[in-house]
């Protein structure tokens, strides 16, 4: 994506041509994408999530006069046909256990104006990582899945981009294309997220109740940590690596 901007800023840049209208952020979460869109665009932003508890944490980050928050089921959007000028779905597929692709993508398409686009951004482990940061992100994912399976934690399924492309075309989107992207997140953000990852992994490993497994997984976590956080610099491309653009 463009220059040295992180992927959210670069994606907002693609929507800057909109001088009015409404852009949907599908999946409020921590509100990072909602803020970037509202700071970058002249159009209104509607931020939706199934969990109303996320909204209060985002209210103070954005201009409430230009951002509207709606709690809803993504399979039944409360918007009339053709009202949206863009939809952004950022890091939702890989984190939602309730993702129903065909009805959700069908609803996105119904609510989009003709000629407008849906942008799906997410993470899927690469078979052949191109950078050390991507390699370490893959190792982080593998370690999490190994520990989660040992604790019998129900996992969200990894969704390869090719499957999403097929689903988008099945519901009627045209000009569906994928590109590989780099997150280009700031060092501070990477450190914060990696610290959260390691803390969560420590708690998960400690809950195993098997000293042998706990030792094995904790050693893997510490080796990973030493590679990621080396010489005071975070080498880790966690969080996003592909963008799918689909036009109605």
Image: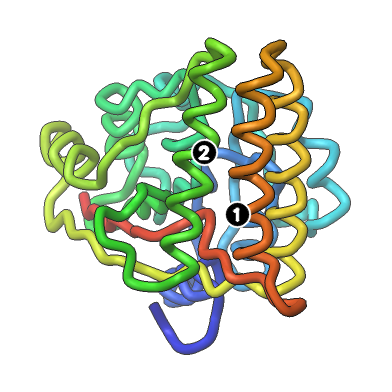
Residue 246 badge = none
Q: Is residue 175 above or below residue 229?
A: above
Q: Earlier in the sequence, mark 2 or mark 1?
A: 2
Q: Residue 73: image x %, image y %?
A: 51, 20
Residue in the image at 77% along x and 58% along y: 192
Residue that mark 2 sits on: 143
Q: Residue 212: image x %, image y %?
A: 64, 21
Residue in the image at 25% along x and 47% along y: 161
Residue closer to the observer: 124 or 146: 146
Residue in the image at 48% along x and 28% along y: 146
Q: In terms of secondary structure, where does tag 1 sit?
A: helix
Q: Residue 50: image x %, image y %?
A: 60, 23
Drawn side of residue 134 relative to residue 217, left or right: left
Q: Residue 48: image x %, image y %?
A: 59, 36
The image shows a total of numbered marks equal to 2
Q: In terms of secondary structure, where does tag 2 sit?
A: helix
Residue closer to the observer: 216 or 2: 216
Drawn side of residue 26 relative to residue 206, left or right: left
Q: What's the CA distance linking mark 2 and mark 1?
A: 9 Å
Residue that mark 1 sits on: 224
Residue closer to the observer: 45 or 214: 214
């Amino acid at each position: 994506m463009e220059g040295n901007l992180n992927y959210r800023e670069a994606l907002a840049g693609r929507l800057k041509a909109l001088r009015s209208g409404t852009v949907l952020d599908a999946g409020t979460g921590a509100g990072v994408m909602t803020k970037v869109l509202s700071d970058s665009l002249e159009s209104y932003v509607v931020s939706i999530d199934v969990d109303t508890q996320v909204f209060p944490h985002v209210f103070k980050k954005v201009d409430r006069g230009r951002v509207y928050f709606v709690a809803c089921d993504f399979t039944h959007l409360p918007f009339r046909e053709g009202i949206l000028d863009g939809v952004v779905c950022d890091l939702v597929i890989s984190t939602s256990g309730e993702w129903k692709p065909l009805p959700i993508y069908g609803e996105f398409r119904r609510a989009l104006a003709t000629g407008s686009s849906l942008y799906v951004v997410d993470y899927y482990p690469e078979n052949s990582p191109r950078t050390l940061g991507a390699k370490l992100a893959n190792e982080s994912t593998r370690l999490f899945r190994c520990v989660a399976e040992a604790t019998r934690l129900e996992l969200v399924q990894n969704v390869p981009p090719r499957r999403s492309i097929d689903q988008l075309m099945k519901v009627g989107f045209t000009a569906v294309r994928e590109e590989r992207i780099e997150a280009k997140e700031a060092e501070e953000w990477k450190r914060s997220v990696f610290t959260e990852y390691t803390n969560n992994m420590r708690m998960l490993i400690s809950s195993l109740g098997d000293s042998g497994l706990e030792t094995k997984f904790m050693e893997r976590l510490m080796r990973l940590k030493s590679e990621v956080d080396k010489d005071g610099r975070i080498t880790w491309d966690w969080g996003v690596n592909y963008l799918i653009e689909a036009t109605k």
